[in-house]
Amino acid sequence: MDIALMMSFLGVAILLTLMPGPDILFVIAQSLSQNRKAGIATALGLCSGLIVHIAAATLGVSALIYQSALAFAIVKYAGAAYLLYLAWQSLKESGEGLTLGNQKTLEYKALYKKGIVMNLLNPKVSLFFLALLPQFVNSSLGHVPLQMFILGIIFLVQALVIFTVVSIFAEKLRNVLLTNQLIAKRIHLIKGMLLGLIAVQIAFSKK
């Protein structure tokens, strides 16, 4: 592959990953409500889901979803509904509060699965790859699907690195917030509001 194109793609990928979107907000929400390991487990799930979207974009499946308004709407609203359900669960726990020494047992496997489900139920991700990847492909080199797949994997790796760093900083912020008893009692409420915001963002997004 063209190294210059790959480096250009990496720069664009980093900027896009850092933009406040559903994935990074979801990682922040989990890290704030639990800890960095919870955020990283969620990030691993989200990035595992990316593999499906990358493959879909490479094989052209994303184009089929994009052309079908019904299929796009079904996947989009299912994703929004799932996030609203997670937000509701967090809001139910909002009266419990959190302290550093009194946390529920963390189920990282469940968070990993939640990350996968959330990512798969966001059709905008496939369409994003479908629009982005071809712009950085050198058709003169041939093997276009393979080039797109490699670019997709580069995106996945950098996203996982960024999400991991974000999880670490979010946990540090969480520890600071927990020194304030008022905020500590509202940490689940904050998480629920974040998840609700992500749900609305997905539900009202357009192609």
Image: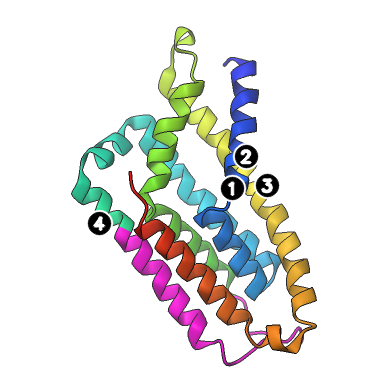
Task: Say if mark 3 contacts mark 4, CB within 8 Å.
Answer: no
Q: Mark 2 points at which residue?
A: 15
Q: Mark 4 points at which residue?
A: 74
Residue 40 drawn at (x, y percent): 64, 59
State how far apart marks 4 and 2 are (Cα): 29 Å
Is residue 149 toward the left or the right of residue 100 in the image?
left
Disc nearest the viewer among 4 and 1: 1
Asked if one can make out residue 102 in the rendered structure from this viewpoint, the answer is no
Which residue is depicted at the point 63% across and 80% down? 187
Colour pattern: rainbow
State how far apart marks 3 and 4 are (Cα): 31 Å
Disc nearest the viewer among 1 and 3: 1
Task: Say if mark 2 contacts mark 1, CB within 8 Å.
Answer: yes
Is residue 58 toward the left or the right of residue 27 in the image?
left
Residue 161 marker = 3
Magenta region: 77-106
